[in-house]
Amino acid sequence: MTAAAIVVAYLVGSLSFAVIVSRAFGLPDPHTYGSGNPGATNVLRTGRKLAAALTLLGDALKGWLVVLAVELWWHPQPVGEAGLAVVALAAFAGHLYPVWFKFRGGKGVATAAGILFALSGWLGVVATAAWALTFFTTRISSVASLAAAIAAPVASAWLLGPGAATLAVTLMGVLIAWRHRDNIRRLRTGAEKPVAPKT
C-alpha cells in the first residue's frame, strides 16, 4: 500500500497552482514571463496579489494535506516513518517535475513548507521563521528560500532526530538549493533583485 501512497502523493504534488490559479484569473502562463518559475513570487509580478496568495496557499496545502492524510488515514496499515518520508519526497518531486504540466515545475519552497508542517508543527514554524526573518531583512525571495532550506534540516535533526524524516528534509533542502542555482549565480554577481525595496 505504500507504493500506492507514493503514487498518489506524486500526482497531487504535480498540481501546479501557479498555472491553475493563473488560468482561473485569466493571467499569462507563469512559464512565459519574469523568472519563468511557476511559483507565487513570479505570479506576484503580474500585480495580482490574490492570485499570488492563492498560489502560495495551494502549493503549501497540497504538501501538508498529502503527508498528513497518509500519516493519519492510510489503511490497512500505517506506512511508517521511512514510508512517510518517501511519500513526502514524492509530493515534493511532483511539484518540481509535475506530470500534468510537462514536468516543468517550481522551486518547491511552498510545498516543502507544507510538508514540514505536516511532519512537525514546530519544524514548520522554524523554517517559516527563517524565511520570514531573512526576507524582511533582504527583500530577496531567493535568499530567504535558501535560508529556510538550510535551517530546516538543522531544525529537523534537533526536533525529529537523525531518522528518515530528517533525511527527507535534508534532500528537499538540497533540491531547493539546486533549483535556485541561477539565483545563486545572480547573487554572486549582484544581479539578483529584491521583490520590493526595503523601507
Image (tube, grey):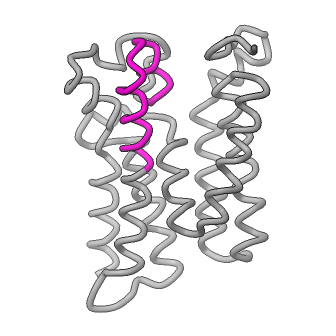
Identify whether 170 is placed above or below 190: below
Residue placed most toward the observer, 120 or 102: 120
Q: Determine if the magenta segment contains residue 117.
A: no
Q: Residue at 50% across / 25% down in the picture?
A: 41
Residue placed most toward the observer, 7 or 124: 124
Please give the range of residues in magenta. Answer: 40-60
The image quarter containing residue 157 is: bottom right
In screen coordinates, is 80 left or right of 169? left
Q: Residue at 27% across / 86% down in the picture?
A: 75
Q: Residue at 70% across / 22% down in the picture?
A: 139
Work out which quarter of the rendered image holds the C terminus and state it. Answer: top right
Residue 51 placed where, x, y %? 35, 26
Q: Residue at 42% across / 55% down in the picture?
A: 63
Residue 136 placed where, x, y %? 73, 29
How many callouts does the rendering have? 0
Residue placed most toward the observer, 161 or 98: 161
In screen coordinates, is 109 left or right of 160? left
Q: Determine if the magenta segment contains residue 45.
A: yes
Residue 124 placed where, x, y %? 61, 58
